[in-house]
């Protein structure tokens, strides 16, 4: 991946930024699935950890040809008034990486036992022995 394109959300008095970002990302997802190419990366360079938000910028990473092909597909139709497309730009030298992943906390043991009883048609005693 040698290039990137920034898609910035413009201020809109009727819709909050998070709603517009959700719509933009949904359109991107449909565009990528319809295209069938898996060589485009996505990042959110203006996310804020203090206020859990993705920010107002969606960054697409890829090779020049892949980015050009994606943007030619017109996947963001209906949002042209709400976005500003900047790029493609050359990716600068690395300043570091950030890995983002989802952590799913385990549920309470009591809930897991109830679920086990429903799925395996067992009694509470068996579920308690299986899930201490």
Image: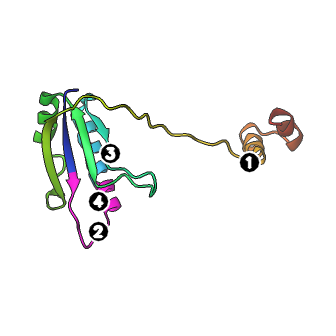
- Report the residue at 18% width, 50% height from top: 76
Q: Is residue 14 magenta?
A: yes
Q: Quadrant of residue 131?
A: top right
Q: Which residue is mark 3?
A: 44
In percent of width and height, residue 101 lies at 48, 37
Q: Distance of mark 2 from mark 3, alpha carbons?
A: 19 Å
Q: Of circles 4 and 1, which is in front? A: 4
Instruction: Name the one closer to the observer, 18 or 48.
Output: 48
Residue 15 is tagged as 2
Instruction: Name the one closer to the observer, 28 or 44.
Output: 44
Which numbered disc, 2 or 3, marks the residue that appears first in the sequence? 2
Which numbered disc, 1 or 2, marks the residue that appears first in the sequence? 2
C-beta proximity under 8 Å, tags 3 and 4: no
Q: Distance of mark 1 from mark 2, alpha carbons?
A: 39 Å
Mark 1 falls on what kind of element? helix
State which region is magenta: 8-23
Residue 111 is tagged as 1
- Report the residue at 14% width, 37% height from top: 89
Q: Which image quarter holds the N terminus? A: top left
């Amino acid at each position: 991946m040698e290039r990137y394109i920034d898609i910035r959300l413009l201020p809109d008095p009727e819709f909050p930024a998070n709603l517009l970002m959700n719509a933009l990302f949904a359109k991107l997802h449909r565009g990528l699935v319809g295209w069938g190419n898996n060589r485009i990366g996505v990042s959110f360079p203006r996310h804020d950890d203090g206020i859990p938000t993705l920010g107002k910028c969606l960054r697409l990473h890829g090779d020049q040809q892949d980015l050009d092909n994606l943007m030619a597909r017109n996947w963001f139709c209906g949002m042209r008034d709400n976005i500003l497309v900047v790029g493609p730009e050359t990716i600068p030298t690395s300043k570091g990486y950030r890995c983002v992943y989802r952590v799913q906390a385990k549920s309470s043991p009591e809930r897991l036992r109830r679920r086990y009883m429903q799925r395996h048609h067992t009694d509470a005693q068996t579920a308690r022995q299986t899930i201490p």
